[in-house]
Image (cartoon, grey):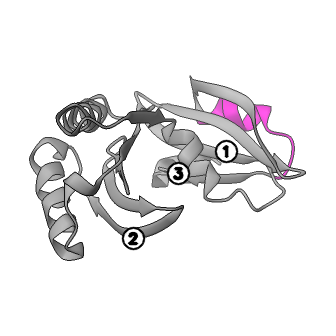
Amino acid sequence: MQLVIDTSTDTASLALVQDNRVLAELTWRCEQNHTTQLLTKLAHLLNQTKLNLQSTSGIIVARGPGSFNGLRVGISTAKGLAFSLGIPMVGISSLEAEAYQHAETSLPICPIFNAGRGEIATAIYQKKHNEWRQLVTEHITTVETLCSQITTKTIFCGEITPLIATQL
């Protein structure tokens, strides 16, 4: 079983996965309270499923882009658990994980996370001919600049605030 941790945005998630099947997951709006909520939520998830960390064979953690505090808490927790349990840990792109949920469409997928100061973190992915590809690398930009560069029908997903939504 693998433990999945995503604290890259104000909405955090934990999941327990085995053989590509989600055994249990917990998603909550934590704002900037990752430090005080992550381990409590993990204990709750394990208690609800009657599973324990000792049966974990690996940890998957979102490595960003995202909230500095959220990433610090998630990655530190993952590293500490991996070290104490003697199991491997792997980091995945938060943007790619967000986009992959829409992989079965034939359209380009553009995940967006709020980067603050009027900027966004984004990239573009697409699954074509059964191959998942990154079309545009992860970068920081503005919604206005992003929209001027997209010329085809595209799926937008991610942390789209009302302000960002009005600009898309």
Quarter of the figure with the N terminus: bottom left
Q: Earlier in the sequence, mark 1 or mark 3?
A: 1
Residue identifier under label 3: 158
Q: Which of the two marks, 2 or 1, is nearer to us in this view?
A: 2
What whole-number distance in Å separates the C-alpha atoms at marks 1 and 3? 8 Å
- In the image, farthest residue toward the right: 129
Q: Earlier in the sequence, mark 2 or mark 1?
A: 2
Residue identifier under label 1: 110
| Displayed quadrant of residue 22 | bottom left
Residue identifier under label 2: 23
Residue 28 shows up from this direction: yes
What whole-number distance in Å separates the C-alpha atoms at marks 3 and 2? 23 Å
| Displayed quadrant of residue 105 | bottom right
Which type of secondary structure does the marked residue at label 1 adopt? strand
Q: Residue at x 20, y 65 (%)?
A: 46
Q: Which mark is residue 36?
A: none
Which type of secondary structure does the marked residue at label 2 adopt? strand
Q: Residues within 10 Å of mark 1 (few under 14, many from 20)?
A: many
In x, y percent, where is residue 162? Answer: 47, 55
What range is drawn magenta here?
Answer: 143-153
Q: Earlier in the sequence, mark 3 or mark 2?
A: 2
Check if mark 2's residue and mark 1's residue have beta carbons within 8 Å.
Answer: no
